[in-house]
Amino acid sequence: MHSSLPSSSVDSLDNGISATKLEAANRYVRWNLLFLFIIFTFLLFPVWLSLVPYVNQATNVVIIITIGLFQLIWLIATICAVRRTLAINSRNKLKITKAQDVESADATANNHSTIRHVVAMTLYKEPMSVLQTTLDSLVRQKDATSRLSVIIGMECRTPDKEAKRDELYAKYESKFLRLIITFHPSGIPGEISGKCSNMNYACRQGLEILRQDDDYNYEKYEHIFTNCDCDAVFDPEYMLELEIEYSKLDFADRHSSIWQSIIIYKRDSMPFFVDITGILRTFFFMGVLIPWNINPMSHYSLSVKLLEEGAFTHPAYQMEDIIALIRYTILTRREIRIRPLNLISINGPTSGASYADEIREWALQVRRWTIGAGEVFHYFIVKTYRMPSLYLSFSWATRFFIYYGLVLCASAIFSVFSPIFVQLINMVAAEHKRLFISDSLFQTICFIFLGTQYAFLLIVTVLVRWCLPVPGDGNNNYNKGLRGITRGLLHWTLMLPTILAYSFVELYSFFELAFRGKDVCKHNAASKNNLVLVKDAGGS
């Protein structure tokens, strides 16, 4: 029997938010202005420091210390990423050894027989081939027909939605325990269009369908929920590994945890800036987002109990993944931890029909992430009084700002342009003393920092391109052979210019958010029309 739900009445729909309260909120004077003010003040810091008499004597010292602190952040992130890479490879070798013991694997699975999985994704205008690649990777999960239910949330505005629904039921209904397809109505008060509102609706309706299904026997099982994009390709052992990690924890920790796999962004071919951005995002998963407990991204897992306590996903904040951890922390009033899954998943990067289109889609994606981060900061400040402790509030805000405000936006601009600007000022300004560091020593140290930055980027390149055991990578030669190594090293030389371009797009996006306010906070999803994921990526 099809588990499908038509659109509900907009008036009777409970989406978990107060539309009146959201509409009454100020759409322009928002806390993201503070975020931008700190970033902009920081970037202008070398300008006024160089021009103020007496104070300008310390300019060289202050800039060297600041860039040195950025280098320290990269060092810490690199150490965390190396440790995570070693853990992933260790698990991969152990998996190969255990695969020879079929009885042991079956015994492990039986220990978790009271656990069932619910995976949810959304679809708007993405090609069906992309969605089917994701579903095919879920079909490969152990006991998918007896323990895995899939919820697909379509929009009422999705073209040919009934035909797509019928096609999905015909091909996949028998391959999962339950397949549920919902149609999210448009025009619900307080919502914005996009994955956040669609996912919120699909989760609420899909779980209600499971509860009302007498044959499903919902209350008998523990449920783990996985939120993913429609272009995600899961490791064949994702659900099994998730169950193992889930079962290691006591009751309290199980329902205070979000599990995040390491995500690789891959296509059959892509421009250098798309490739480099994907490499850096994977690195930051391992080096910053997970160990610093900032936020999950793209697809992640948690208990259904935590999902419901955290009111599912917020239908008025476009980046439902960036906001997830801090929103669940605020609503449950307990600290939520991100826990790593030592395996690789694959997501599709941005794609375009032409090179110019590739640039546009890449910039739109960066803009969307940045505006989403600014909105999440506003949400946090408004709700911070509900945080479990003042220390946790300050700690998370600091980590969040360091990553989204400094690492991704200001650090590259500051590190490259402040030494150049200061040297130009010193050439034309009146002669004055230098505190500790002369101009010649200043130049030498800056070039040393440039070298160490490229050393970090080389480690990033080697780790992500050649050290991570990507599922199905044996069938793909993108990073292999002389051509793959040459491309990887060429892209390594282009990493700093790409980071600079990324930073300028981020800075522009923060200004756009400041001037246009809440009106710019819409989910302009990246195009998937030209996305071709690596073939057989989810295979064993």
Image (cartoon, grey):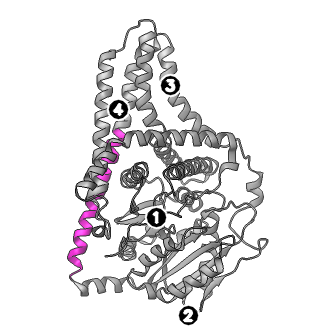
Q: Amino acid at mark 1?
A: Ile
Say the numbered circle drawn on residue 215.
2
The magenta stretch spans which residues? Answer: 72-100
- Count of marks placed on residues: 4
State which mark lies toward you, 3 or 2: 3
Q: CA distance from mark 4 to mark 1?
A: 33 Å
Which quadrant would the C terminus be assigned to in this image?
bottom left
**Which of disc 2 and disc 4 is earlier in sequence?**
4
Q: Which residue is mark 1?
A: 258
Residue at 40% x, 65% y: name it: 346
Is the C-beta separation of discs 4 and 1 under 8 Å? no
Q: CA distance from mark 4 to mark 2?
A: 61 Å
**Which of disc 3 and disc 1 is earlier in sequence?**
3
| Residue 159 rendering spot, x and y as whole percentages | 65, 72
Would you place residue 353 above or below residue 429 in this image?
Answer: below
State which mark lies toward you, 1 or 3: 3
Q: Nearer the viewer, residue 379 or 272?
A: 272
Q: Which residue is mark 4?
A: 68
Q: Is residue 20 visible?
A: yes
| Residue 95 rendering spot, x and y as whole percentages | 25, 73
Q: Which residue is mark 3?
A: 45
Judged from the image, the secondary structure of the residue bearing numbered disc 1 is strand
Q: Quadrant of residue 537?
A: bottom left
Which quadrant would the N terminus be assigned to in this image?
bottom right
Judged from the image, the secondary structure of the residue bearing numbered disc 4 is helix
Q: Amino acid at mark 3?
A: Phe
Binning the other alpha carbons within 10 Å of mark 2 as few (below 14), some (14 to 19) or many (20 upward) gives: few
State which mark lies toward you, 4 or 1: 4
Is 300 situated left or right of 521 in this image? left
Q: Nearer the viewer, residue 452 or 203?
A: 452
